[in-house]
Image (cartoon, grey):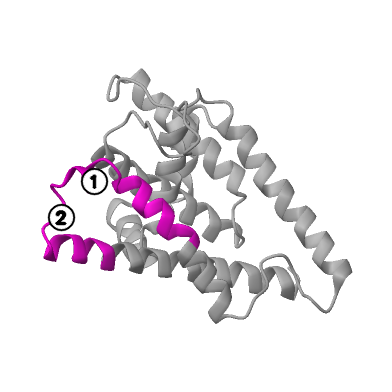
Amino acid sequence: MDTLLKNWIKAFVIGNFIWFGLTVAYGIIIGVFNLSQTEFYSSNSFLHNFILYPVGIWIGFKITKTPFFGIDENKGDEKVFKKQMDKILKDEEIEFSKVKSNKSKNPIENNLVPETHLRALAWTVACWRLTIENANNKMMQEKKVVKFCRLFLAQEKKRKKIKDYNRADVRIIKMLSLACPLKDVDKLIAKHGWNLEVSHAFEKEIGYR
């Protein structure tokens, strides 16, 4: 893995931690001022967190002084890196497109699965991802995470644990899984004996290939 990609991943991970911190701080503010029951907050809680996400990512890249689309001094590397990122995003969207639309310009609006259920599922996604990444000693492709999330929700529907789901639910569960603190994910993995064998068995169960 070249230095450029390592620095980008580092900035991205830091950005996700910052975003998680922002959501916690935001939640505290909402609690202090007792705004959680207001219509503005209750109907837009996902949107608020989604808006904070790019802010956290931007701060992560800013404090690490990492250009989002490559190194300014080397235009060739910048073009190559931008091409790679465009492919990553395109591959993600292909997976998202396999789920029925949430019929909104807002990518996380009109979701069908309750937030509490999505949060619970997100921990499973986080355990699976970290187990695979640790075993392979490399970052997982984001399109694979999206695929796992959509198949996981499909299995939940098949088991009648949820009535239905759409693209917004897949995006939200993936976003929530990124917000799970690695320290807590490690504890869950150890507590429930989540290893590579368990991960592969779970993949087979939901039809992941």
Q: Is residue 41 magenta?
A: yes
Residue picked out by circle 2 = 35
Residue at horizontal 68%, vertical 48%? 88
Picture quadrant where residue 4 is located: bottom right
Considering the numbered disc 1 on the image, is that residue within a helix, a strand or a loop?
helix
In the image, taking residue 104 as reference, residue 2 lies left or right, namely: right
**N-term mark: 2 or 1:** 2
Residue picked out by circle 1 = 40
Quadrant for the N terminus, please: bottom right
Picture quadrant where residue 66 is located: bottom right
Closer to us: 193 or 159: 159
Asked if residue 201 shows in the view, the reply is: no
What kind of residue is marked 1?
A: Phe
Residue at horizontal 50%, vertical 40%? 200
Closer to us: 204 or 165: 165
Considering the numbered disc 2 on the image, is that residue within a helix, a strand or a loop?
loop
Asked if residue 133 shows in the view, the reply is: yes
